[in-house]
Image: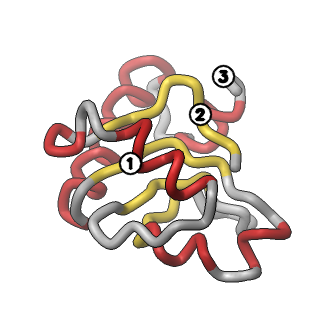
Amino acid sequence: MNIYRKLYVGESIKGKEKSILRKIKYRRPQLQAYVIVLSQKEGEQLEIYHAAMLLQPLYFEKEPWIVGIAASEWEAYELVRKIAEEVHEATKTLEMKKYIQERI
């Protein structure tokens, strides 16, 4: 599992992220967590998945870069908005994937 060193964490999950990420790493189901990952699709930026999606065999082969973690889907969308604002402020573009990849 790849984790962005400046992980974005939702307000309602702060303080629990290490425990949740450890469980994700060891393939234990997380029912109340969503992850924001760098998209592996051409032309896409970020994707939001329920953490349980990472238990599928596809993600064992190509481990995604986790850049954010949230307690709900709504909170994950809020984190993506926060990331977009940060990227726009720094680069005057919305190339979130490129911005994060340059900092990995």
Image-quadrant location for residue 100: top right
Residue that mark 3 sits on: 103
Residue drawn at x 43%, y 36% is 18
Q: Is residue 95 above or below residue 20?
A: above
Residue drawn at x 55%, y 54% is 37
Give the left or right position of residue 58, taking residue 85 as reference: right
Q: Is residue 44 above or below residue 80?
A: below
Give the left or right position of residue 21, taking residue 39 as reference: left
Residue that mark 1 sits on: 69
The amino acid at mark 2 is: Tyr
Q: Nearer the viewer, mark 3 or mark 2?
A: 2
Q: Earlier in the sequence, mark 3 or mark 2?
A: 2
The amino acid at mark 1 is: Ile
- Label 3 close to label 2 by CB (< 8 Å): yes
Could you classify mark 2 by the number of other residues whose Cα lies within 10 Å: few (under 14), some (14-19), or many (20 or more)? some
Query: How is this picture coloured?
Result: secondary structure
Q: Position of residue 3 (x, y in %)?
A: 61, 39
> SS class of the residue under badge 2?
strand
C-alpha distance separating marks 2 and 1: 11 Å
Q: Position of residue 45 (x, y in %)?
A: 57, 55
- Label 1 close to label 3 by CB (< 8 Å): no
Q: Earlier in the sequence, mark 2 or mark 1?
A: 2
C-alpha distance separating marks 3 and 2: 9 Å
C-alpha distance separating marks 1 and 3: 18 Å
Q: Position of residue 89 (x, y in %)?
A: 37, 21
Residue that mark 2 sits on: 4
Q: Earlier in the sequence, mark 1 or mark 3?
A: 1
Residue drawn at x 65%, y 48% is 65
